[in-house]
Amino acid sequence: MDTRYNPAEIEQKWQNKWLEIGLDKTPKDNNKPKFYTLSMFPYPSGSLHMGHVRNYTITDVIARLKRMQGYRVLHPMGWDAFGLPAENAAINRGVPPSKWTYQNIDQMRGQLQRLGLSIDWDCEVATCSPDYYRWTQWIFLQFFQAGLAYQKEAAVNWDPIDQTVLANEQVDNEGRSWRSGAIVERKLLRQWFLKITDYAEELLNDLDKLPGWPERVKTMQANWIGKSTGAYLEFPVVGMDEKIGVYTTRPDTVYGVSYIVLAPEHPLTKQVTTQARQSEVEAFVKEVSNQSELERTAEDKPKRGIPTGGKGINPFTGEEVPIWIADYVLYEYGTGAVMGVPAHDARDFKFAKQQDLAIKAVIVRADAADVPQAPKEAYTEPGIVVNSDIFNGMSSVDAKLAIVEYAEKQGFGQARVQYRLRDWLISRQRYWGAPIPIVHCPDCGAVPVPDRDLPVQLPENVEFSGRGGSPLAQLESWVNVDCPSCGTPAKRETDTMDTFIDSSWYYLRFTDAKNDREVFDSTKVNDWMPVNQYVGGIEHAILHLLYSRFFTKVLRDRGLLNFDEPFQHLLTQGMVQGLTYMNPNKGGKEKWIASNLVNPTDPRDPETGEPLQKLYATMSKSKGNGVAPEDVIAKYGVDTARMFVLFKAPPEKDLEWDEADVEGQFRFLNRVWRLVSDFVDNPQSSKKSKSPSPKSKIEKDLRRAIHTAIKEVGEDVDGEYQFNTAISELMKLSNALADANCKDSPIYAEGIQTLVSMLAPFAPHIAEELWHLLGNDGSVHTASWSTHDPEALIAHEITLVIQINGKKRGDLQVSAQLDKAQLEKYALESEVAQRYIEGKTIKKAIVVPGKLVNFVIG
């Protein structure tokens, strides 16, 4: 056998062979337990980075492992292919978005196949393909028919030069358009929403059904949903019939209200503003309309506001309080109005101090001697109610309930549960997305496109200038259609859907990817779902995962599914970090220097000569610290790249790229190759791989090492997927085999076979090659996963160390079953002990069972 390990040759060979025999196809029969493992599908940017390699390798190991453990496995791949980058490419490169996207898909598919991933490519989907977005549109209509899709006016980012709506990511931190450089305005447009708030309580409660999710992800989702229990209270406006509704979680502080704040865009703002204040209020509203939501709510920015001149009435006291508008109150949140209680809210306190507004304490510490006339800071803890009429002396906790009950009886308030979660705005005024399948008829209103006419396809004769609004809205031949209901001339909806819609159901389509008659066969989706193991980045912890859970529940309620949650277990893999160089002396602005421009022994800025700071940071083009997967593969092979990303850190931790550690894994695979080569080439070696009765101690020790490895690796790969420690156990086994003095034994043959088969999920190509060189039939990836023999783990003999005054003087082999007294007797009678003890007095004998006997002599 060739003793040289040539990864390029064997990797291509086995990838071709696996394709030929259909190794990775999803089983059609269901006579085995199922296991559905899935990586979050990528955006087809054109090239893989090491983060992709890590993500897909982790999922691939799980897929291969589960097949060997006797499961039928579904392991698919697809492309999250709609979105802004393709449209930008169309503008900048003059190519259609579809051409740019499909070129990237072809390139990345080839790169993924080069990694030898055991993916069933027959299940492949691309969200930009009409045979996929036909069903995305069909699902939208399910929401529409259920009353869960609706239109309303909403604030959007508006570029006044290009006359188009911008996504948040197209607005820089100075509030300017990424393309025109114009200061972005906030503008009200009619937009489509999905009523995710109807499922807020279930989405929150069902987090308890996900013990296989990281706690921090569940906490992030719970905080995003943001359930709070409080009160809705109405403050009449002086001189008007209107009332200002506010939601508060602190009704116990209502007697301390000294002002009310409206969002500048609140419909009542104009009505409550007095004539004298009109021009100033209008100027403030216009100024705030140019700020992004991020700017307005930033904690580190001062809160700005002005009085409207209007007044409201505190219904509990009858007192008039001023009505203000401020930038930190958003109309989209809650009621778009808040009551200001500066004595008991830190933000209100700061605002009241800035604007010289009244501050009245109504809660004091239980042990407070008196009520402070001018509080120096907001008191936000529970306490005793004061200055609150009939509620004085109550605990603030009890007062919350009593005050809400009083408000309900008086007719100016009620208890309310509220959520931070808002309905999902899905409209995008862009071309490269799934068209919303609605026709707007002057007589019938919003009319769904009939199922038979789906998909509503994207037209190809579109110009991309980046200006003048949605390209679809400008294409009259596409926009103007007859109403599907009454035949009247009507217009298509020109908004496309948020790309999160596409990724909110793709995992369902994978179970029946080629079905052209229905969205999926419910029998198949109920068989394969939920996904047993989902793998992806923590950056998707909230939106994608929350939206997917929402879709699952809606489709369940539409009778298409019989399960509540889409993903049983979630693994959020860490980032891949590269050695990075930064010049910290740039006036607070980080300056990254590409690694290839730096002398690692004396890192300096090539332009200024200033010393550079060395650190590990997430690989990115901007930092110049990336490592191209193809370069690593060309030098070391796919299996080495896989072994490194699996061994360097546990899957959920960040991984620091280190070339020396990559070489270490390459050396390990070479060691395994030589072990098997020597075994195959040794004419004396036993080709039997099982022996029920090892005869010598050497054989017994080796078999114990083999089955210890099987047990430890099995525990590492089950549940927690601690692949790094599993590979460590394989290294220990290879060392035990290299050191064994029984290479002709069938026990040694068992060890070689075991090492190769357990290596298979981690380094699939070399394992397959060695498996066949060992004379095995069939693929190692369809062989059964090794299980340990508990009997083999029992040590029948131990090496007992003999110490005199704490120093080792020798050892002897004894039965593992001896008790303390017997161990001491054997040690005392041994030739070693007698040699040192003769003529001396034994002061003490220290026995450590299974390890040593120490005689203290004088």
Image (cartoon, grey):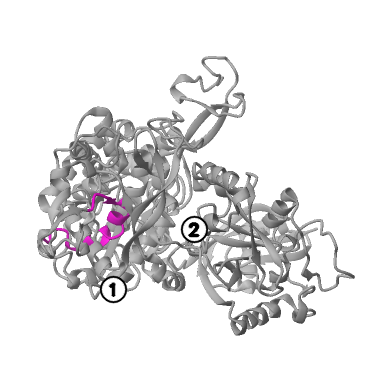
**Residue 766 in magenta stretch:** no
Q: Look at the image and give the residue range highlighted in magenta.
A: 493-516
Residue placed most toward the observer, 384 or 845: 384
Q: Is residue 581 left or right of residue 561?
A: right
Task: Report, in whole angstroms, how far the alpha carbon at label 2 lies from the one at label 1.
Answer: 38 Å
Residue at coordinates 67% horizontally, 70% vertically from top-left? 314
Label 2: which secondary element: loop
Screen quadrant of the C terminus:
bottom right
Q: Position of residue 524 (x, y in %)?
A: 18, 69
Residue at coordinates 71% horizontally, 62% vertically from top-left? 258
Q: Position of residue 166 (x, y in %)?
A: 37, 42
Using the rendered image of the protein, determine whether residue 118 is visible from the camera's viewpoint: no
Please name the residue that numbered disc 2 is placed on. Answer: 267
Residue placed most toward the observer, 354 or 250: 354
Q: Position of residue 429 (x, y in %)?
A: 30, 46
Residue 697 vs 413, above or below: the answer is above
Q: Earlier in the sequence, mark 2 or mark 1?
A: 2
Q: Which mark is residue 556?
A: 1
**For residue 758, what is the image quadrant?**
bottom left
Label 1: which secondary element: helix
Residue extending furthest toward the bottom: 409
Binning the other alpha carbons within 10 Å of mark 2 as few (below 14), some (14 to 19) or many (20 upward) gives few
